[in-house]
Amino acid sequence: MYNLEHEDGPLSEEDRRLLAALIAYPTKTAAAKALGISRSTIYYKLRDEELREAYARMRSEAIRDATDSLMTVAEASVQVLHDVAHDTNVPAQTRVTAASKILDLTLKVHELTDVVARIAALEEELG
């Protein structure tokens, strides 16, 4: 699933276990405990640039996977907000909250789209 290689070939089994724990547990402290090592050992090992880069790649892939999962339920979630906002049998405050959330999300998408377009224009200008 994750790219666990570096310039010199595959990572050691110990490094693989370390990276798997860092991805699986919410904190470095929890990962260290699961591995039976100290937290400072994790920080020491992450001083290695190749291991740190492999960890960064794994985190990026995990974030992409989570984003993909969110995208599959986003449309249904928006529909729920829409249904609540338009259901006259729902308390007014709940309808306002749903409508407000729809507006907030719409503005965020608009802002992000604008930022991406600006970055693309700058990249084109520079290169």
Image (cartoon, rainbow, N blue to C red):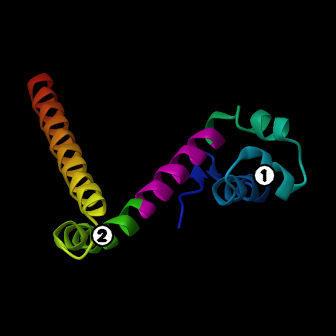
Residue at 41%, 57% in the rendered image: 64
State which tag comes first along the sequence, 1 or 2.
Answer: 1
Residue 49 is left or right of residue 89, and the answer is: right
Judge whether residue 110 is colored magenta. no
* Frontmost residue, 118 versus 96: 96
Query: Which part of the image, by quadrant, shows the C terminus?
Result: top left
Quick check: 9 above or below 116? below
> Dot 2, crowdedness within 10 Å: few (<14), some or many (≥20)?
few
Task: Check residue 63 in the rendering and tell me which mark sits there, or answer none.
Answer: none
Query: In the structure shown, which secondary structural element does the residue marked by tag 1 occupy?
Result: helix
Residue at which label 2 appears: 77
Q: Residue at x 78, y 41 (%)?
A: 42
- Give the image quarter of residue 13: bottom right
Q: Which residue is identified by label 1? A: 30
Give the alpha-carbon distance from disc 1 to disc 2, as whole Å: 32 Å
Amino acid, disc 2: Ser
Q: Main secondary structure of the magenta part?
A: helix
| In-image side of 44 versus 51 (left or right) | right
Residue 116 in view: yes
Q: Which contiguous range is marked in magenta?
A: 51-66
